[in-house]
Amino acid sequence: MDISLQTHRSYVDRPISRLPTPAFVLSRPIIESNIKRLLNDVSQLGISFRPHVKTLKSIEVTRMMLEGGKHRKIVASTVCEIEGALPLVTEGVLDECLYGMPITGSVLPRLVKIGRSVKILLMIDNEQQVEILERFSLENPGLGIWDVFIKVDVGSHRAGLMNSSPRLRRLIERAESSFAVSIYGFYCHAGHSYGCRDRESVDAVLQSELDGVLAASQMVPSTDRSFVLSIGSTPAAHAIKAIKDRILKRCIIELHAGNFPALDLQQVCTGLVSRADQAARILTDVCSVYPERNEALVNAGAIALSRETSSIPGFGQVVEQPDWHVVRLSQEHGILGLPSDGQPVSEGKQNVGDVFRVGQRVSLYCQHVCITAAAFHVYYVVDENDIVRDTWIPWKGW
Protein backbone atom coordinates (compact mmCIF):
# COMPACT_ATOMS: atom_id res chain seq x y z
CA MET A 1 0.00 0.00 0.00
CA ASP A 2 1.19 3.51 -0.79
CA ILE A 3 2.30 5.03 2.52
CA SER A 4 0.59 8.29 1.57
CA LEU A 5 -2.80 6.63 2.04
CA GLN A 6 -1.95 6.19 5.72
CA THR A 7 -0.29 9.54 6.37
CA HIS A 8 -1.65 12.12 3.93
CA ARG A 9 -3.86 14.03 6.36
CA SER A 10 -0.89 14.63 8.66
CA TYR A 11 0.56 17.05 6.08
CA VAL A 12 -2.41 19.42 6.06
CA ASP A 13 -1.35 22.95 7.08
CA ARG A 14 2.30 22.11 6.45
CA PRO A 15 4.53 23.44 3.64
CA ILE A 16 5.23 21.18 0.69
CA SER A 17 8.85 20.99 1.85
CA ARG A 18 7.58 18.47 4.43
CA LEU A 19 5.96 16.12 1.90
CA PRO A 20 7.29 12.67 1.00
CA THR A 21 8.54 12.44 -2.56
CA PRO A 22 7.65 12.02 -5.30
CA ALA A 23 4.42 13.86 -4.53
CA PHE A 24 1.63 15.09 -6.79
CA VAL A 25 0.92 18.71 -5.86
CA LEU A 26 -2.09 20.72 -7.06
CA SER A 27 -2.63 24.46 -6.73
CA ARG A 28 -6.25 24.99 -5.79
CA PRO A 29 -6.24 28.70 -6.78
CA ILE A 30 -5.00 27.80 -10.27
CA ILE A 31 -7.53 24.98 -10.65
CA GLU A 32 -10.34 27.32 -9.66
CA SER A 33 -9.11 29.97 -12.09
CA ASN A 34 -8.82 27.50 -14.97
CA ILE A 35 -12.30 26.13 -14.38
CA LYS A 36 -13.83 29.58 -14.02
CA ARG A 37 -12.30 30.75 -17.29
CA LEU A 38 -13.73 27.88 -19.31
CA LEU A 39 -17.14 27.92 -17.65
CA ASN A 40 -17.43 31.65 -18.34
CA ASP A 41 -16.90 30.96 -22.06
CA VAL A 42 -19.53 28.22 -21.97
CA SER A 43 -21.98 30.54 -20.23
CA GLN A 44 -21.43 33.37 -22.70
CA LEU A 45 -22.09 31.06 -25.65
CA GLY A 46 -25.13 29.47 -24.04
CA ILE A 47 -24.04 25.94 -24.95
CA SER A 48 -24.20 22.74 -22.95
CA PHE A 49 -21.17 21.40 -21.07
CA ARG A 50 -20.14 17.86 -20.17
CA PRO A 51 -16.83 17.73 -18.28
CA HIS A 52 -14.62 14.69 -18.73
CA VAL A 53 -13.48 13.32 -15.38
CA LYS A 54 -10.45 11.36 -16.63
CA THR A 55 -7.74 13.83 -15.57
CA LEU A 56 -8.07 14.68 -11.87
CA LYS A 57 -10.25 11.71 -10.96
CA SER A 58 -11.74 13.09 -7.77
CA ILE A 59 -15.07 14.07 -6.31
CA GLU A 60 -13.75 17.53 -5.45
CA VAL A 61 -12.68 18.55 -8.96
CA THR A 62 -15.75 16.97 -10.55
CA ARG A 63 -17.95 19.00 -8.23
CA MET A 64 -16.13 22.19 -9.27
CA MET A 65 -16.50 21.40 -12.98
CA LEU A 66 -20.25 20.87 -12.56
CA GLU A 67 -20.47 24.35 -11.04
CA GLY A 68 -22.75 23.36 -8.19
CA GLY A 69 -25.24 21.61 -10.47
CA LYS A 70 -25.43 24.24 -13.20
CA HIS A 71 -23.98 21.52 -15.44
CA ARG A 72 -25.37 18.10 -14.55
CA LYS A 73 -23.62 15.53 -16.75
CA ILE A 74 -20.18 14.01 -17.18
CA VAL A 75 -18.24 11.74 -19.52
CA ALA A 76 -15.92 9.09 -18.11
CA SER A 77 -13.38 6.71 -19.61
CA THR A 78 -13.83 4.02 -16.95
CA VAL A 79 -16.73 2.58 -15.01
CA CYS A 80 -14.72 3.26 -11.85
CA GLU A 81 -14.92 6.99 -12.56
CA ILE A 82 -18.70 6.84 -12.85
CA GLU A 83 -18.94 4.87 -9.62
CA GLY A 84 -16.70 7.41 -7.92
CA ALA A 85 -18.94 10.28 -9.00
CA LEU A 86 -22.14 8.74 -7.61
CA PRO A 87 -22.05 10.78 -4.35
CA LEU A 88 -22.71 13.81 -6.56
CA VAL A 89 -25.99 12.21 -7.58
CA THR A 90 -26.96 12.07 -3.91
CA GLU A 91 -25.93 15.72 -3.58
CA GLY A 92 -28.33 16.57 -6.39
CA VAL A 93 -25.75 17.99 -8.82
CA LEU A 94 -25.31 15.06 -11.25
CA ASP A 95 -28.01 13.50 -13.44
CA GLU A 96 -26.28 11.84 -16.39
CA CYS A 97 -23.07 9.90 -17.12
CA LEU A 98 -21.69 8.97 -20.52
CA TYR A 99 -19.46 5.91 -20.60
CA GLY A 100 -17.00 7.20 -23.16
CA MET A 101 -15.47 3.96 -24.46
CA PRO A 102 -17.19 2.14 -27.32
CA ILE A 103 -19.34 -0.36 -25.48
CA THR A 104 -18.53 -4.02 -24.90
CA GLY A 105 -20.64 -6.61 -23.15
CA SER A 106 -18.32 -7.08 -20.18
CA VAL A 107 -19.17 -3.70 -18.62
CA LEU A 108 -22.93 -3.81 -19.13
CA PRO A 109 -23.84 -5.53 -15.82
CA ARG A 110 -21.97 -2.83 -13.85
CA LEU A 111 -23.55 -0.05 -15.90
CA VAL A 112 -27.02 -1.50 -15.39
CA LYS A 113 -26.44 -1.47 -11.64
CA ILE A 114 -25.20 2.14 -11.75
CA GLY A 115 -28.13 3.04 -13.98
CA ARG A 116 -30.50 2.48 -11.08
CA SER A 117 -29.06 5.66 -9.55
CA VAL A 118 -28.19 7.86 -12.54
CA LYS A 119 -28.94 7.99 -16.26
CA ILE A 120 -26.29 6.14 -18.29
CA LEU A 121 -25.47 6.92 -21.92
CA LEU A 122 -23.35 4.68 -24.13
CA MET A 123 -20.94 5.22 -27.03
CA ILE A 124 -21.05 3.16 -30.22
CA ASP A 125 -19.04 3.12 -33.46
CA ASN A 126 -19.68 -0.40 -34.75
CA GLU A 127 -22.79 -2.35 -35.76
CA GLN A 128 -21.60 -5.29 -33.64
CA GLN A 129 -22.09 -3.13 -30.56
CA VAL A 130 -25.76 -2.75 -31.44
CA GLU A 131 -25.98 -6.53 -31.68
CA ILE A 132 -24.40 -6.86 -28.23
CA LEU A 133 -26.92 -4.43 -26.74
CA GLU A 134 -29.83 -6.20 -28.42
CA ARG A 135 -28.67 -9.58 -27.14
CA PHE A 136 -28.19 -8.18 -23.64
CA SER A 137 -31.68 -6.66 -23.71
CA LEU A 138 -33.21 -9.99 -24.74
CA GLU A 139 -31.36 -11.74 -21.92
CA ASN A 140 -32.43 -9.06 -19.42
CA PRO A 141 -36.04 -8.12 -20.22
CA GLY A 142 -37.37 -4.88 -18.82
CA LEU A 143 -34.15 -2.89 -19.19
CA GLY A 144 -35.55 -0.34 -21.60
CA ILE A 145 -33.75 1.35 -24.48
CA TRP A 146 -30.14 2.54 -24.27
CA ASP A 147 -29.51 6.12 -25.34
CA VAL A 148 -26.31 6.20 -27.40
CA PHE A 149 -23.88 8.65 -28.89
CA ILE A 150 -22.43 7.66 -32.25
CA LYS A 151 -18.71 8.39 -32.28
CA VAL A 152 -17.44 10.32 -35.31
CA ASP A 153 -13.75 10.36 -36.27
CA VAL A 154 -12.76 13.86 -37.38
CA GLY A 155 -9.07 13.14 -37.76
CA SER A 156 -7.64 11.73 -34.53
CA HIS A 157 -8.08 8.11 -35.73
CA ARG A 158 -8.60 6.80 -32.22
CA ALA A 159 -12.24 5.74 -32.07
CA GLY A 160 -15.21 6.51 -34.27
CA LEU A 161 -16.10 6.43 -37.95
CA MET A 162 -15.25 9.05 -40.53
CA ASN A 163 -18.08 10.68 -42.46
CA SER A 164 -16.59 9.32 -45.67
CA SER A 165 -16.97 5.73 -44.45
CA PRO A 166 -20.07 3.88 -45.67
CA ARG A 167 -19.97 2.09 -42.32
CA LEU A 168 -21.15 5.28 -40.58
CA ARG A 169 -24.35 5.47 -42.59
CA ARG A 170 -24.95 1.75 -42.08
CA LEU A 171 -24.41 2.14 -38.33
CA ILE A 172 -26.90 5.01 -38.18
CA GLU A 173 -29.49 2.96 -40.10
CA ARG A 174 -28.82 -0.07 -37.88
CA ALA A 175 -29.25 1.98 -34.72
CA GLU A 176 -32.42 3.62 -36.02
CA SER A 177 -34.00 0.22 -36.67
CA SER A 178 -32.90 -1.34 -33.36
CA PHE A 179 -35.24 -2.13 -30.49
CA ALA A 180 -32.39 -1.74 -27.98
CA VAL A 181 -30.88 1.67 -28.75
CA SER A 182 -31.93 5.22 -29.53
CA ILE A 183 -29.57 7.78 -31.06
CA TYR A 184 -29.05 10.54 -28.50
CA GLY A 185 -26.42 12.44 -30.44
CA PHE A 186 -23.09 12.46 -32.25
CA TYR A 187 -19.76 12.79 -30.46
CA CYS A 188 -16.23 13.54 -31.61
CA HIS A 189 -12.95 14.20 -29.86
CA ALA A 190 -10.24 16.01 -31.79
CA GLY A 191 -7.26 14.58 -29.96
CA HIS A 192 -5.06 15.82 -32.79
CA SER A 193 -5.76 19.38 -31.58
CA TYR A 194 -3.00 18.73 -29.02
CA GLY A 195 -0.57 19.07 -31.91
CA CYS A 196 -1.75 22.60 -32.76
CA ARG A 197 0.64 25.46 -32.05
CA ASP A 198 -1.58 28.55 -32.37
CA ARG A 199 -5.17 29.68 -32.01
CA GLU A 200 -5.83 29.71 -35.76
CA SER A 201 -5.03 26.01 -36.14
CA VAL A 202 -7.11 25.12 -33.07
CA ASP A 203 -10.00 27.16 -34.47
CA ALA A 204 -9.77 25.17 -37.71
CA VAL A 205 -9.88 21.86 -35.83
CA LEU A 206 -12.88 23.05 -33.82
CA GLN A 207 -14.73 24.01 -36.99
CA SER A 208 -13.95 20.59 -38.46
CA GLU A 209 -15.39 18.95 -35.35
CA LEU A 210 -18.65 20.83 -35.71
CA ASP A 211 -18.75 20.07 -39.43
CA GLY A 212 -18.15 16.39 -38.70
CA VAL A 213 -20.90 15.82 -36.16
CA LEU A 214 -23.34 18.00 -38.09
CA ALA A 215 -22.76 16.03 -41.29
CA ALA A 216 -23.22 12.77 -39.40
CA SER A 217 -26.49 13.94 -37.87
CA GLN A 218 -27.79 14.75 -41.34
CA MET A 219 -27.39 11.10 -42.34
CA VAL A 220 -30.26 10.17 -40.05
CA PRO A 221 -33.36 9.48 -42.14
CA SER A 222 -35.84 12.35 -42.12
CA THR A 223 -36.72 13.18 -38.54
CA ASP A 224 -37.89 16.08 -36.43
CA ARG A 225 -35.70 15.05 -33.49
CA SER A 226 -32.97 17.29 -32.12
CA PHE A 227 -29.64 15.61 -31.54
CA VAL A 228 -26.86 16.52 -29.14
CA LEU A 229 -23.68 17.37 -31.05
CA SER A 230 -20.83 16.88 -28.58
CA ILE A 231 -17.49 18.40 -29.57
CA GLY A 232 -14.30 19.36 -27.83
CA SER A 233 -10.96 18.76 -26.21
CA THR A 234 -9.10 21.08 -23.88
CA PRO A 235 -7.38 23.00 -26.72
CA ALA A 236 -10.71 23.30 -28.54
CA ALA A 237 -12.44 24.36 -25.33
CA HIS A 238 -10.04 27.28 -25.03
CA ALA A 239 -11.03 28.34 -28.55
CA ILE A 240 -14.75 27.63 -28.21
CA LYS A 241 -15.75 31.22 -29.01
CA ALA A 242 -14.72 30.47 -32.61
CA ILE A 243 -18.07 28.74 -33.20
CA LYS A 244 -20.16 31.60 -31.81
CA ASP A 245 -21.69 32.37 -35.20
CA ARG A 246 -22.51 28.71 -35.86
CA ILE A 247 -24.70 27.86 -32.87
CA LEU A 248 -27.54 25.86 -34.38
CA LYS A 249 -31.12 26.15 -33.20
CA ARG A 250 -32.21 22.67 -34.22
CA CYS A 251 -29.27 20.93 -32.54
CA ILE A 252 -27.90 21.05 -29.01
CA ILE A 253 -24.21 21.96 -29.05
CA GLU A 254 -22.35 20.33 -26.18
CA LEU A 255 -18.73 20.96 -25.23
CA HIS A 256 -16.64 18.29 -23.53
CA ALA A 257 -13.16 18.72 -22.07
CA GLY A 258 -11.18 17.16 -19.24
CA ASN A 259 -7.60 18.38 -18.99
CA PHE A 260 -8.49 22.05 -18.47
CA PRO A 261 -8.55 22.23 -14.63
CA ALA A 262 -4.89 21.18 -14.38
CA LEU A 263 -3.23 21.77 -17.78
CA ASP A 264 0.31 20.65 -18.65
CA LEU A 265 3.23 21.23 -20.99
CA GLN A 266 1.35 19.74 -23.94
CA GLN A 267 -1.35 22.36 -23.44
CA VAL A 268 1.23 25.13 -23.09
CA CYS A 269 2.57 24.09 -26.50
CA THR A 270 -0.76 24.97 -28.14
CA GLY A 271 -0.15 28.63 -27.34
CA LEU A 272 -3.59 28.97 -25.75
CA VAL A 273 -2.46 28.79 -22.11
CA SER A 274 0.63 29.93 -20.26
CA ARG A 275 3.20 28.07 -18.21
CA ALA A 276 1.77 29.72 -15.09
CA ASP A 277 -1.67 28.22 -15.80
CA GLN A 278 -0.42 24.74 -14.90
CA ALA A 279 -1.91 23.59 -11.61
CA ALA A 280 -0.01 20.30 -11.26
CA ARG A 281 3.59 19.74 -10.21
CA ILE A 282 5.59 16.71 -9.20
CA LEU A 283 7.64 17.41 -6.07
CA THR A 284 10.85 15.42 -6.12
CA ASP A 285 14.29 15.19 -4.48
CA VAL A 286 17.66 15.62 -6.12
CA CYS A 287 19.34 12.32 -5.25
CA SER A 288 22.71 12.89 -6.89
CA VAL A 289 24.63 15.38 -9.06
CA TYR A 290 27.09 14.46 -11.84
CA PRO A 291 29.25 17.46 -12.88
CA GLU A 292 31.30 15.36 -15.32
CA ARG A 293 28.22 14.86 -17.51
CA ASN A 294 26.34 18.00 -16.38
CA GLU A 295 23.32 16.06 -15.11
CA ALA A 296 21.44 15.42 -11.88
CA LEU A 297 19.29 12.54 -10.68
CA VAL A 298 15.80 12.92 -9.18
CA ASN A 299 13.47 10.31 -7.71
CA ALA A 300 10.69 10.80 -10.26
CA GLY A 301 10.94 8.52 -13.27
CA ALA A 302 8.66 7.02 -15.88
CA ILE A 303 6.05 5.90 -13.33
CA ALA A 304 5.72 9.34 -11.75
CA LEU A 305 6.00 11.39 -14.94
CA SER A 306 5.02 9.12 -17.88
CA ARG A 307 6.92 8.98 -21.16
CA GLU A 308 4.76 11.57 -22.90
CA THR A 309 6.50 14.32 -24.86
CA SER A 310 5.71 17.53 -26.73
CA SER A 311 7.57 20.29 -28.56
CA ILE A 312 8.90 21.32 -25.14
CA PRO A 313 11.97 19.11 -24.68
CA GLY A 314 12.11 16.10 -22.41
CA PHE A 315 9.64 14.38 -20.13
CA GLY A 316 9.20 17.23 -17.65
CA GLN A 317 10.48 20.72 -16.91
CA VAL A 318 11.98 22.02 -13.67
CA VAL A 319 9.61 24.69 -12.37
CA GLU A 320 12.27 26.68 -10.52
CA GLN A 321 14.92 26.28 -13.26
CA PRO A 322 13.05 26.16 -16.59
CA ASP A 323 16.26 25.78 -18.61
CA TRP A 324 16.55 22.28 -17.13
CA HIS A 325 14.42 19.34 -18.23
CA VAL A 326 14.00 15.65 -17.52
CA VAL A 327 16.04 14.39 -20.46
CA ARG A 328 16.02 10.62 -19.70
CA LEU A 329 13.90 8.27 -17.65
CA SER A 330 14.06 4.88 -16.00
CA GLN A 331 11.27 3.40 -13.91
CA GLU A 332 11.99 5.48 -10.80
CA HIS A 333 14.94 7.58 -11.99
CA GLY A 334 14.71 10.91 -13.78
CA ILE A 335 17.80 12.55 -15.26
CA LEU A 336 17.86 16.36 -15.27
CA GLY A 337 19.88 17.95 -18.03
CA LEU A 338 19.98 20.73 -20.56
CA PRO A 339 18.18 19.90 -23.81
CA SER A 340 20.35 19.19 -26.82
CA ASP A 341 18.32 21.35 -29.19
CA GLY A 342 20.62 24.35 -28.91
CA GLN A 343 18.22 26.55 -26.94
CA PRO A 344 19.99 29.41 -25.12
CA VAL A 345 20.56 28.88 -21.40
CA SER A 346 20.24 31.64 -18.81
CA GLU A 347 23.51 33.06 -17.53
CA GLY A 348 24.81 31.17 -14.52
CA LYS A 349 22.50 28.22 -15.17
CA GLN A 350 24.71 26.19 -17.51
CA ASN A 351 26.52 24.06 -14.92
CA VAL A 352 24.65 21.46 -12.90
CA GLY A 353 26.75 22.10 -9.80
CA ASP A 354 25.70 25.74 -9.77
CA VAL A 355 22.01 24.85 -9.96
CA PHE A 356 21.39 21.61 -8.03
CA ARG A 357 22.70 19.95 -4.89
CA VAL A 358 21.97 16.60 -3.26
CA GLY A 359 18.88 16.76 -1.06
CA GLN A 360 17.44 19.79 -2.83
CA ARG A 361 13.71 19.81 -3.47
CA VAL A 362 12.60 20.63 -7.03
CA SER A 363 9.20 20.66 -8.70
CA LEU A 364 8.53 19.39 -12.21
CA TYR A 365 5.87 20.37 -14.70
CA CYS A 366 4.61 17.25 -16.47
CA GLN A 367 4.00 16.73 -20.17
CA HIS A 368 0.58 15.04 -19.88
CA VAL A 369 -1.13 15.46 -16.54
CA CYS A 370 -3.91 12.95 -17.27
CA ILE A 371 -1.40 10.11 -17.31
CA THR A 372 0.89 11.51 -14.62
CA ALA A 373 -1.94 11.96 -12.12
CA ALA A 374 -3.03 8.34 -12.55
CA ALA A 375 0.18 7.11 -10.88
CA PHE A 376 -0.54 8.81 -7.55
CA HIS A 377 -2.77 7.70 -4.70
CA VAL A 378 -3.06 11.15 -3.09
CA TYR A 379 -3.27 14.68 -4.46
CA TYR A 380 -1.73 17.28 -2.12
CA VAL A 381 -3.75 20.48 -2.57
CA VAL A 382 -1.94 23.72 -1.78
CA ASP A 383 -2.76 27.41 -1.50
CA GLU A 384 -0.92 30.29 -3.16
CA ASN A 385 1.86 29.99 -0.54
CA ASP A 386 2.44 26.27 -1.16
CA ILE A 387 0.90 25.27 2.16
CA VAL A 388 -1.03 22.01 2.01
CA ARG A 389 -4.66 22.83 2.76
CA ASP A 390 -6.34 19.57 1.76
CA THR A 391 -5.69 16.12 0.37
CA TRP A 392 -7.83 14.47 -2.28
CA ILE A 393 -8.02 10.73 -2.89
CA PRO A 394 -8.48 9.90 -6.60
CA TRP A 395 -10.53 7.07 -8.03
CA LYS A 396 -8.24 4.19 -8.99
CA GLY A 397 -8.72 1.30 -11.38
CA TRP A 398 -11.18 0.53 -14.14
Image (cartoon, helix red, strand yellow):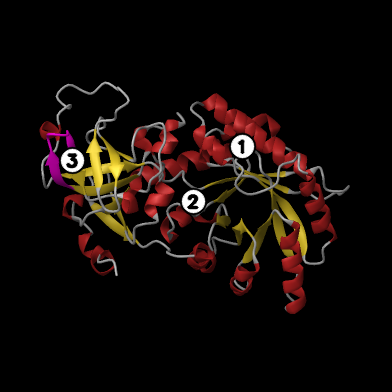
Looking at the picture, tell me which residue is in the foreground, 93 or 306: 306
Identify residue type, mark 1.
Leu
Identify residue type, mark 2.
Met
Does dot 2 land on a helix, a strand or a loop? helix
Q: Nearer the viewer, mark 3 or mark 1?
A: 3
Q: Which residues are magenta?
A: 286-296
Distance of label 3 from label 1 (alpha carbons): 48 Å
Q: Residue 145: horizontal and vertical position, in percent? A: 75, 67
Query: Mark on residue 296?
Result: 3
Q: Residue 170: horizontal and vertical position, in percent? A: 81, 51
Decide if residue 231 is on the left or right side of residue 150: left
Q: Earlier in the sequence, mark 2 or mark 3?
A: 2
**Pointer 2 residue:** 65
Outermost right residue: 222
| Tags 2 and 3 touching, CB below 8 Å | no
Q: Residue 396: horizontal and vertical position, in percent? A: 42, 64
Count residues near mark 3 (Cα–Cα under 10 Å), then give few for <14, some for 14-19, many for 20+. Answer: many
Q: Earlier in the sequence, mark 3 or mark 1?
A: 1
